[in-house]
């Protein structure tokens, strides 16, 4: 379970970093995306990171079956 928590933490951090870069950039970062698509990708990454945090918090506070305790 410890490795799984580190994986979630890594992906959450990377999604927040990617969202911040794509949203705050004034210029086009990648030739494959238009500037509008770049902002959309940034907001989508931010939404995905928030959903991942909600999932991790839910798993932490959810009641576990008796055999897992």
Image: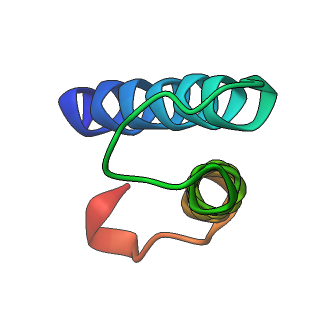
Please provide percent x and percent y for residue 60.
Answer: 60, 51
Q: Nearer the viewer, residue 25 or 51?
A: 25
Please provide percent x and percent y for residue 6.
Answer: 33, 24
Q: Residue at x 39, y 72 (%)?
A: 66
The answer, for residue 54, to whether it is visible in the render is no
Is the image coloured rainbow, by chain, by secondary structure, or in one colour? rainbow
Q: Nearer the viewer, residue 29 or 41?
A: 29
Is residue 65 shown above or below 19? Answer: below
Left or right placement of residue 30 versus residue 38 in this view: left
Q: Residue at x 72, y 24 (%)?
A: 25
Q: Residue at x 70, y 61 (%)?
A: 47
Q: Which quadrant of the view contains residue 63?
A: bottom right
Q: Nearer the viewer, residue 2 or 52?
A: 52
Q: Which quadrant of the view contains residue 21?
A: top right
Q: Quadrant of the C terminus?
A: bottom left
Left or right placement of residue 1 versus residue 5 in this view: left
Please provide percent x and percent y for residue 59.
Answer: 55, 61
Please provide percent x and percent y for residue 48.
Answer: 58, 60
The answer, for residue 40, to whether it is visible in the render is yes
Is residue 30 shown above or below 6? Answer: below
Q: Quadrant of the N terminus?
A: top left
Q: Which quadrant of the view contains residue 62?
A: bottom right
Q: Residue at x 38, y 35 (%)?
A: 30
């Amino acid at each position: 379970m410890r490795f799984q928590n580190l994986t979630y933490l890594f992906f959450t951090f990377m999604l927040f970093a990617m969202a911040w870069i794509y949203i705050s950039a004034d210029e086009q970062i990648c030739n494959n995306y238009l500037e509008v698509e770049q902002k959309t990708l940034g907001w989508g990454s931010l939404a995905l990171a928030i959903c991942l945090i909600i999932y991790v918090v839910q798993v932490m506070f959810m009641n576990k079956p008796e055999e897992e305790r």
